[in-house]
Image (cartoon, helix red, strand yellow):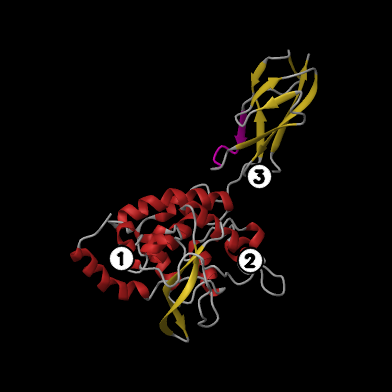
Amino acid sequence: MFLSARKITKMAAAFCFAALFLCLSPVSAPAAAAETSETDGPVDEAALEEYRFESMEAYVNMIRPIARKVGLKYNYLPSVLAAQCIQETGYGGYTSTGTASMIYYHNHLGMKTSMINSTWAKHSVWPGQSYLKRTPEWYGGRLTHITDSFRIYKSAEQCLTDYVAFMTYARLPGGAYKYRYDVIGNPSYAKTIEAVRANGYCTDPNYSKAVIRLINKWNLTALDKGFGIRVSRIKLNRKKLLKLKKGASYQLKATTYPRSAPIRSIRWKSSDMSVASVSSKGKVRALKKGTVTITATSRDNKKAFAEVRIRVK
């Protein structure tokens, strides 16, 4: 994905504009970067040029399905999540010369090593490694650059999942949730991103406006289809007691309702795996004499489940 000198020169000029909108995690004042085991100083962005995307479309097409998957799963509007990634990375480095490391380290949302406090740490999926990076920040209405420590992820999906965990579980010193009630489950992209900005996630005063423009430019609201619709009922293809001989098998099938719910995956469980086991796809295998209960639970809503009893003869 190495770009020509002509393209790099063009993007260097565009960086001044992109930097005005780039927003990372919240800080109260410039501070010295934390030490990391990954580098002795800020990462050399120029050495990672080949990891930058070759077009805006390429990055948008890559991040769209990931944002939809994570957003629907954790109830954070996918259109906002996708647009934030585009804004933070400058289209995967295509329009910003200082974000190649974000692609290389899969940090598509500028997640810093230190995120307010540790109130949400047990919900974080961050593996623990970090790197140093020069980054733009706004203080008192003025744009400046500092060196700070950022998280390293194994994939874009892991990064987005970590970000939503932060939005869901981070708390203020008094114990109240910092973002949760304003952004999680909010069906309005304008209100969601403005709450993210107003509650302190970013330092750029124009961040929400920039994200909204990207949502409209790329029709990202299409990613929100089914948002907020959750599975409320499950029906199995077997209701009555199922009798099986030892060594026999039976395929259970679960149908979720409403049919419009986007997340329809099922978690299967046997009350006694030594009597009858059940696979992740609902296939039951009779192992020894006894009676068990097989439960199918929605991965989207643990309150939606169905059961059937199995008697092994």
The stretch of residues the image draws in magenta is 254-261
Q: Which mark is residue 301?
A: 3
Q: Which mark is residue 95?
A: 1
Is 283 positioned to the left or the right of 133 in the image? Answer: right
Mark 3–mark 2 CB contact (< 8 Å): no
Q: Sequence-wise, which precedes: disc 3 or disc 1?
A: 1
Instruction: Tell me the amino acid under the disc marked 1.
Output: Thr
- Regarding mark 3 in the picture, which secondary structure is present there? loop
- Regarding mark 1 in the picture, which secondary structure is present there? loop
Look at the picture and state if 7 lies above or below 271: below
Q: Which mark is residue 170?
A: 2
The percent coordinates of residue 276 (x first, y second) are 73, 23
Is 2 positioned to the left or the right of 230 in the image? Answer: left
Mark 2–mark 1 CB contact (< 8 Å): no
Gap between marks 3 and 1, in whole Å?
40 Å
Instruction: Tell me the amino acid under the disc marked 2.
Output: Ala
Look at the picture and state if 250 lies above or below 303: above
Gap between marks 3 and 2, in whole Å?
22 Å
Instruction: Tell me the amino acid under the disc marked 3.
Output: Asn
Task: Based on the picture, tell me whether residue 259 belongs to the magenta stretch.
Answer: yes
Q: Which mark is residue 23?
A: none
The foreground one among 267 and 186 is: 267
- Badge 3: few (under 14), some or many (20 or more) residues near its Cα, within 10 Å? some
- Badge 1: few (under 14), some or many (20 or more) residues near its Cα, within 10 Å? many
* Placement of the N terminus among the 4 image quadrants: bottom left
The part of the image, by quadrant, that contains residue 271 is: top right
- Outermost residue, right side: 290
The percent coordinates of residue 260 (x first, y second) are 54, 40
